[in-house]
Image (spheres, rainbow, N blue to C red):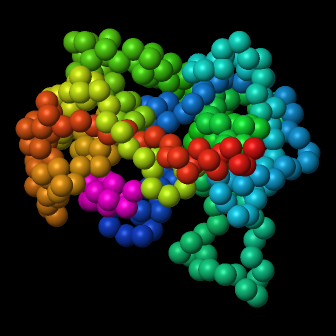
């Protein structure tokens, strides 16, 4: 995991000219593009919050965690099941509650450097009668679903709601039938398809302890993704749908290292040229690896239920 993170940061931080801890923190809580949210969500619904249970429940945030976290449970009535959830009328969404603030005489940290995360700055929130599109993943306990970040909620009153939901539905269809996307005459749609698959495959299980396990995807699919990346416009940094999921940043999600024949230059322009050259050269021979749950994670899941 450390190897992958090191390479991803090389491409992502340098490629976006992030140079300070404050800017990196801001980047970490910036709203993720819709394609990324779709690729990393297990279930996507449009629904209405019927109620929020008054009593919090406590579960480990991830398998093997020594301490439990408090969750308020929202019961959401499903109006439209966009991804998964077909035939289900409602589901439960756990909203992790932030820990109480540190005492004033012992803050336990520098609030200027490490401010607390609140709803809207990292932790998602819902309110009774709220209607929204939710990007969900199952909690390891199986008791409810969870959202990872505040932007996994698109409120129905948002000015961009219809536009973003339309894009989400398009992305779900492309994930379900990527061959159709790769056969499109539209270069943007082909890149969108590749971006969805890369984000899906290279998303480490957040609830897995230890090193995540990797396995190779099929050679045919890997070729389609990499050849699409090779033909992309690597200078385009302003795609309104992909956002920061540029060809360059998608490359660095792949976890390519010097062991794969790639040395990351420090200069941004040289780095972009070197990355694209590597993709062109290796598109038909390199096999993209996907993250999967390791055995330790599966064992801890069984023990936590």
Tell me if residue 283 comes above or below residue 31 in the rendering. Answer: above
Question: Residue drawn at (72%, 55%), measured in percent from left and top?
Answer: 60
In the image, residue 284 sits, relative to residue 272, either above or below, namely: above
User: In the image, what residue occupies the spot 32% across and 59% down?
Assistant: 3
280 left or right, relative to 155: left
In the shown orientation, is residue 99 left or right of residue 292? right
Give whichever of 250, 205 is nearer the camera.
205
Q: Position of residue 27 (x, y in %)?
A: 44, 56
Left-right relation of 159 to 143: left
Q: Is residue 225 visible?
A: no
Q: Quarter of the image holding residue 264?
A: bottom left
Residue 285 at x, y percent in the picture: 14, 34
Residue 155 within the magenta-colored segment of the rendering: no
Is 270 left, or right, of 291 in this rendering?
A: left
Residue 127, picture quadrant: top right
Q: Please, is residue 17 above or below residue 292 in the view? A: below
List x then y, in percent, for residue 165: 54, 23
Q: Nearer the viewer, residue 234 or 217?
A: 217
Give the magenta range: 1-14
Q: For the stretch drawn in magenta, what is the main secondary structure?
A: helix
Tell me if I can see residue 290 in this picture: yes
């Amino acid at each position: 995991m450390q190897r992958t993170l090191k390479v991803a940061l090389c491409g992502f931080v340098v490629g976006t000219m992030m140079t300070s801890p404050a800017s990196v923190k801001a980047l970490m809580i910036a709203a993720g593009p819709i394609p990324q949210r779709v690729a990393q969500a297990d279930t996507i619904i449009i629904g209405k919050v019927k109620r929020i249970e008054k009593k919090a429940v406590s579960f480990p945030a991830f398998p093997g965690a020594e301490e439990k976290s408090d969750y308020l449970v929202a019961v959401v009535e499903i109006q439209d099941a966009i991804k998964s959830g077909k035939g289900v009328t409602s589901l439960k969404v756990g909203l992790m509650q932030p820990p109480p603030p540190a005492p004033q005489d012992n803050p336990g940290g520098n609030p200027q450097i490490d401010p607390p995360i609140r709803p809207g700055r990292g932790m998602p929130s819902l309110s009774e009668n709220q209607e929204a599109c939710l990007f969900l993943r199952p909690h390891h306990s199986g008791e409810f679903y969870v959202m990872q970040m505040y932007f996994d909620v698109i409120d129905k009153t948002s000015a961009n709601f219809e536009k973003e939901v339309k894009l989400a539905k398009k992305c779900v269809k492309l994930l379900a039938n990527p061959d159709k996307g790769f056969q499109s005459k539209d270069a943007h749609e082909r890149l969108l398809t590749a971006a969805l698959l890369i984000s899906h495959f290279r998303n480490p299980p957040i609830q897995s302890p230890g090193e995540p396990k990797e396995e190779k995807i099929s050679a045919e699919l890997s070729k389609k993704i990499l050849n699409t990346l090779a033909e992309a416009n690597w200078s385009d940094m302003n795609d309104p749908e992909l956002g920061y999921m540029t060809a360059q940043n998608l490359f660095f999600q792949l976890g390519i290292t010097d062991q794969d024949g790639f040395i990351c230059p420090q200069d941004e322009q040289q780095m972009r040229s070197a990355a694209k050259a590597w993709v062109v050269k290796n598109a038909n021979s390199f096999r993209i690896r996907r993250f999967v749950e390791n055995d330790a994670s599966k064992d801890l899941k069984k023990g936590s239920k």
